Image (tube, rainbow, N blue to C red):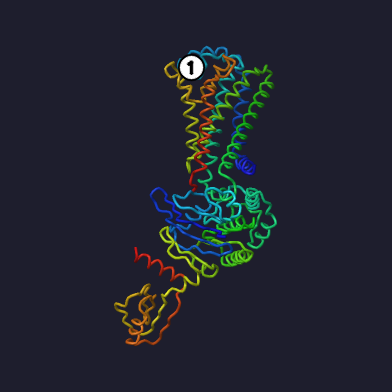
Amino acid sequence: MTIIRHELKQGRTNFLVWTFSIAFMLTVCVFLYPEMEGQLEGVNDIFSSMGSFTAAFGMDRLNFGTLIGYYAVECGNVVGLGGAFYAALVAVRILAKEEKDKTAEFLLSHPISRARIVTEKLLSVFIEITAMNLILLVLSAASMFIIGEDIPTKEVLLLHLAYYLLQLELMGICFGISAFLRRGSLGIGLGIAAVMYMINLISNITEKTAFLKYITPFGYCDGADIVTNGSLDVPMLSIGMAIGIVGIVCAYVRYTRKDIH
Amino acid sequence: MEAIKTTKLTKYYGTARGIIDLDLTVRQGEFFGFIGPNGAGKSTTIRTLLGLISPTGGSAQVFGMDISKDQKQILSRIGYLPSETAFYPGMKVKDVLKLSANLRSKNCSEEAEILCRRLQLDPMRKVDDLSFGNRKKVAIVCALQHDPDLLILDEPTGGLDPLMQKEFFDILRERNRKGTTIFFSSHILSEIQRNCTRAAIVRDGRIIACDTVDALSKTNAKRITVHGQIDLGDLAGIRDRQDHADSVSFLYSGDIHALLYRLAESRITDLSITEPDLDEIFLHYYQKEEETT
């Protein structure tokens, strides 16, 4: 527990800044909905006739004039992308920072096994990501309640669950990478999250690129699919979780054997 | 029982040499010096003993436990002071000391307070604001506060002013008298000579000499200083020759009769023959090794 507590303290400011920023944008988006509701009926036609751009963001299958259609596109991008960046950044740094900041000698000269260090560091990232998602979910529901709309509970829960699982998959991948790095982890974390997002946009454009959905965790976070089907894509989700677990296993295998400099 | 025992311990970083076939024995309760210049393999040896890096070959035991199998038990009995100290940002000294104690599942607050007082370290200061010397003091308290059986110190005095160095060595000697084994790595030979009972000299990753400090000092080389006129010519066994206006000084390990004949033939005004200090011994061992390689 010592390392978990220590990591949570060390990451507190980062956590608050990211959670506040994403929460701010999310609630602003929801609060803008009543203002835009009337205009969105007309906008819906425009948004649904922009060809590839429309498909890329799933706006061909969502009704922008409803709260959940609006929420799935606007808030989905805020929570999905913001959360993905946060999860990737925190996870890719958590193991690598010890060598980069030269604190590895301090930590590893104490009587704690490397496996325990990996476990506690992983749990600290997991706790931060879970806490952020719970806060975002509560604020999202509260802001919908404040603007006087009926909360589409099932769809909102499914969307947030998908974003949470996306973050956990990215956490697993980046955590695995972190065990191999000694410096320069932040760029890699941001790069992975951004590339995964771009792959999903490309996969939405044509049938030929649809298979790319299986590579990126954003594939099972498609708001249009979730709202339309009322469920998550379990096969895609399973592949994603398996990739995340492989990342975590790699972290254990590498970090418990690695020479620390 | 030996506190440290290595058998043909070897570490390569890729193709680069770390340490080669290192055989070293440190008995419990010893104040053991580990001497060598930068890059000789001192830190590699220490980092291997601590399990930070894995050996390429050979084996090592600490208190009879294997470094690769019993790392956690070994580390619970070791206090380690690294040559470079780095701590987590934003923490106060007391938080670092508490974190270190918690990682050992021990309450060391009483001993930490005593050590902070002796080393004049303010526990309320932030580590980011500390000078290099004061950060070193934090690392010293971390290494000592849990009263370890073995202290491994890597270039420990860098950054400490002379008064603090004296206090630090006083603490080490007290601990040593109580039975703590001290493994003291340094390139400052006077520190080793003043404090250690035995020492090993490491060069290019290999131990080239290991004995009591007294025995290491009693090499057959002598420091000869001659005032007056003397032609040393082709006299064999001369090293570290230093010529001055009216004198010449050199380390001599050749035939003593040849030297006496040469001195008798010369017009000298003064002569001194002394035991070399450890710095000179070190040089002596190094040059001897270079000649044989």
Q: Nearer the viewer, residue A251 or B77?
A: B77
Is B279 placed left or right of A125 in the picture?
left
Is B113 placed left or right of A177 in the picture?
right
Q: Nearer the viewer, residue B34 or B97?
A: B34
Circle 1 residues within 10 Å: few <14, some 14–19, many ≥20: many
Give the answer, above or below, for where B220 lies relative to B267: above
Q: Amino acid at mark 1?
A: Ala
Residue A22 position in % (x across, y down)? 59, 30
The residue under the point 54% across, 24% down is A238
The residue under the point 67% across, 26% down is A138
Residue A135 position in % (x across, y down)? 65, 30
Give the answer, above or below, for where B268 lies relative to B198: below
Quick one: which residue is furthest to the left in this view? Answer: B234
Q: Can you identify the residue that label 1 sits on?
A: A55
The residue under the point 48% across, 40% down is A180
Residue B262 position in % (x across, y down)? 33, 83
Helix, strand, or loop for circle 1? helix
Residue B20 position in % (x across, y down)? 42, 56
**Chain of the residue on which disc 1 is drawn:** A
Quadrant placement of the C terminus of chain B: bottom left
Is A133 placed left or right of B209 in the picture?
right
Quadrant placement of the N terminus of chain B: bottom right
Give the answer, above or below, for where A143 lies relative to B11: above
Quadrant in the picture for residue B79: bottom right
